[in-house]
């Protein structure tokens, strides 16, 4: 059997699994919101019964639960329509996601890119001189990066670069090519830099000991060629497989960074929606994140198979 | 498979006199003996005949301990974790003895209801009374950080235990039963794995927000424990798969030991190494997640305070009273740093094959 049909079958199977997974996500989220005591319209003051009846009618809460659940799921799967936000009145969930996604995606992707560049560089340099002073120093630094929570790192960076040196704005969003993106990106990338540096070092150490690297050296390749052409490709496999979980953490990371720097991103809307019990917005953002993660994981797996010819699906 | 085999422990329990070469006097049936690999000693009565030659084996644990002590960073981590744990447990009592301050003591003098810098007296001169300064209400920050440590460490340990309990039982069952059940159980883990778990946890904590601090902590245990058991289940399952066809399991089965007993007395103890390593690394992850949730306002609720909530309170005043963030933040980072090094060291010590040179 040739490779391509196998790969295709793998992709199709994974895409098919995505649908029930999204259904599980929607059901869990919907169930949690409905099981919790209270309502999105409940306030500290009691609402007159007549008004409550009107509210329930308007939002279809007077119908049996299975009908409400069925309608939610049907609208999402049939029309990709998550409904209208309960708190941001008149705004569709789709519009809110479309508006806030670019902010989160910009910060998240740039942070991950920065982390990849710095992490791979530091990790490979450490692996080329194992147990040297620079190796220990960079690995201790990486461990520090893993141990500092990003909500501590962010304010400390603000304290240094905004409130003491007056170099960068402490918060707010001024669009992408502006100085306002620097601190959020630095804050977010710290953790990934550290992880990627550690993974690169471990992967490279293992590869540099292998037979084919010895062969490459024996046939007279320069150290530079050995590392760039032969070692990096295999040594970076752990980094590639880390990308899947990293993306999941990136979502939570952006939530924190958006709270600290007051960015109008997906994470900020999500926290606000959770506090407001804004059911359509919560379900919309949660399912959107779930779909993104599933597709990204699929891409990572395909990239993995492409990079490592030994892997077959 | 096991049911139709007659249980025969009574016969096997009494070894024929000639079979026991050297009755080791120092060893009793209840003793736990660790060997590599650990044979079915949990049911030592059943396999009593083999007791004699087991003691000669090198202990995996003593070996690992020696390797761990050679790793300077791991020893550093172990010492710091021990110190911080002890300080968190007894520090507040000592402070109360020395200065009369408790973590929630608010001075009655209005002039003191403000944040005093570290190592400073209210009049600006040097003083040892508040080594970390005070918070907005004039409460001693050191006492609060130490008490916050109690909460943070407790959340980390209990949530890890929850994940340990679920993960080990689930993984061991799936791995041992194998076949279709294993396939189904691990497929469920795969699906759960691909969910944006932490996002769902936020929804859970937000909509079920408890008015009492205690209720929220219980909710937190459930939420954090349910997030972190998946990896544990996978690790244990992998271990069990490689263990279940070994001779000592066959021996236990042949002597009529029941399936649950084989899983939990014979197989699970042999997976301890990776389980310990992963648990040690789960504690800092859970503590970090707790801090993250506390930062968002969904974690530990006042009057209780963890390092996460203390640091979050400090963020509000970062420009004016930086010590309110720095001290809880640095204490937490130091603890996580040490726990991570300890976990790494344990991995190197217990699994020398994957360790770095």
Image (spheres, coloured by chain):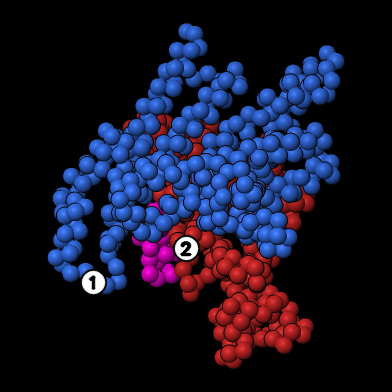
Chain colours: A blue, B red
Circle 2 crowding by C-alpha within 10 Å: few under 14, some 14–19, many from 20: some
Q: Is residue B141 left or right of residue A54?
A: right
State which quadrant residue A163 falls in.
Answer: bottom right
B38 to B300, vertically: above or below: above
Distance (Cα) linking label 1 and label 2: 26 Å
Q: Residue A164, which numbered label?
A: none
Chain of residue at mark 2: B
- Between A74 and A249, the residue placed more toward the observer is A74
Circle 1 crowding by C-alpha within 10 Å: few under 14, some 14–19, many from 20: few
Q: Is residue A183 magenta?
A: no
> At which x and y percent is residue A100?
46, 46
> At which x and y percent is residue A224?
81, 24
Question: Circle 2 — which element?
Answer: loop
Q: Residue A46, which numbered label?
A: 1
For the point 57% across and 32% down, which residue is it?
A241
Asked whether disc 1 touches disc 2, contact meaning CB atoms under 8 Å apart, the reply is no
Chain of residue at mark 1: A
For the point 74% across and 55% down, which residue is it?
B75
Q: Determine if marks 1 and 2 fall on one subunit.
A: no
Look at the image and tell me whether residue B340 can be seen: no
Question: Circle 1 — which element?
Answer: loop
For the point 30% across and 71% down, which residue is it?
A44
Q: Is residue B207 magenta?
A: yes
- Between A199 and B58, the residue placed more toward the observer is A199
Give the total number of marks visible in the rendering: 2
Magenta highlight: main SS:
helix
The segment highlighted magenta reads B201-219
Residue under numbered circle 2: B297
For the point 85% across and 15% down, which residue is it?
A220
Nearer the viewer's eye, disc 1 or disc 2?
Answer: 1
């Amino acid at each position: 059997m040739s490779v391509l049909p196998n790969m295709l079958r793998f992709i199709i199977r994974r895409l098919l699994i995505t649908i029930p997974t999204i259904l599980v996500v929607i059901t869990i989220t919907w169930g949690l919101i409905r099981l919790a005591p209270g309502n999105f319209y409940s306030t500290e003051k009691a609402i007159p019964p007549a008004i409550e009846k009107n509210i329930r009618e308007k939002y279809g809460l007077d119908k049996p639960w299975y009908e409400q659940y069925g309608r939610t799921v049907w609208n999402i799967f049939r029309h990709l329509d998550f409904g209208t936000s309960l708190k941001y009145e008149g705004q569709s969930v789709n519009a809110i996601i479309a508006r806030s996604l670019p902010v989160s995606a910009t910060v998240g992707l740039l942070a991950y890119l920065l982390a990849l560049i710095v992490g791979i560089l530091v990790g490979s340099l450490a692996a080329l001189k194992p147990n040297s002073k620079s190796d220990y120093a960079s690995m201790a630094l990486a461990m520090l990066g893993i141990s500092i929570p990003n909500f501590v790192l962010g304010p400390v960076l603000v304290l240094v670069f905004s409130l003491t040196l007056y170099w960068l704005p402490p918060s707010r969003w001024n669009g992408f090519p502006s100085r306002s993106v620097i601190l959020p990106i630095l804050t977010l990338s710290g953790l990934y830099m550290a992880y990627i540096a550690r993974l690169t070092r471990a992967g490279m150490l293992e590869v540099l000991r292998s037979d084919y690297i010895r062969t490459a050296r024996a046939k007279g390749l320069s150290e530079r060629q050995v590392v760039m052409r032969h070692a990096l490709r295999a040594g970076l496999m752990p980094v590639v497989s880390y990308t899947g979980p990293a993306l999941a953490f990136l979502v939570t990371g952006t939530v924190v960074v958006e709270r600290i720097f007051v960015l109008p991103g997906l994470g900020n809307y999500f926290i606000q929606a959770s506090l407001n019990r804004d059911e359509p917005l919560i379900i919309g953002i949660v399912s959107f994140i779930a779909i993104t993660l599933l597709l990204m994981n699929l891409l990572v797996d395909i990239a993995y198979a492409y990079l490592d010819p030994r892997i077959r699906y | 498979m096991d049911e139709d085999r007659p249980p025969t422990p009574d016969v096997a329990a009494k070894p024929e006199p000639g079979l026991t070469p050297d009755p080791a006097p120092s060893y009793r049936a209840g003793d736990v003996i660790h060997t590599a690999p650990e044979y079915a000693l949990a049911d030592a009565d059943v396999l009593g005949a083999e007791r004699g030659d087991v003691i000669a084996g090198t202990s995996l644990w003593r070996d690992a301990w020696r390797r761990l002590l050679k790793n300077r960073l791991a020893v550093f981590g172990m010492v710091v974790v021990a110190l911080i744990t002890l300080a968190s447990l007894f520090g507040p009592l000592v402070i109360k003895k020395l200065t009369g301050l408790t973590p929630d003591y608010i001075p009655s003098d209005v002039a003191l209801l403000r944040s005093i810098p570290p190592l400073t007296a209210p009049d600006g001169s040097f003083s040892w009374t508040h080594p970390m300064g005070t918070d907005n209400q004039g409460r001693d920050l050191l006492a609060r950080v130490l008490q916050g440590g109690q909460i943070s460490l407790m959340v980390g340990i209990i949530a890890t235990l929850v994940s340990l309990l679920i993960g080990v039982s689930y993984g061991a069952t799936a791995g041992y039963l194998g076949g279709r059940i294993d396939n189904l159980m691990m497929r469920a883990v795969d699906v759960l794995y691909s969910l944006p778990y932490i996002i769902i946890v936020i929804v859970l904590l937000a909509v079920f927000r408890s008015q009492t601090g205690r209720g929220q902590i219980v909710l937190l245990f459930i939420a954090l424990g349910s997030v972190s058991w998946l990896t544990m289940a996978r690790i244990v399952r992998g271990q069990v798969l490689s263990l279940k066809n070994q001779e000592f399991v066959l021996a236990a089965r042949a002597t009529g030991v029941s399936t649950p007993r084989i899983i939990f007395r014979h197989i699970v103890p042999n997976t301890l190494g990776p389980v310990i390593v992963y648990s040690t690394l789960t504690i800092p992850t859970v503590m970090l997640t707790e801090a993250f949730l506390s930062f968002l306002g969904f974690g530990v609720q006042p009057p209780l305070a963890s390092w996460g909530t203390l640091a979050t309170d400090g963020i509000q005043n970062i420009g004016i009273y930086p010590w309110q963030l720095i001290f809880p933040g640095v204490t937490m980072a130091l603890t996580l740093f040490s726990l991570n090094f300890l976990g790494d060291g344990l991995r190197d010590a217990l699994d020398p094959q994957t360790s770095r040179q």
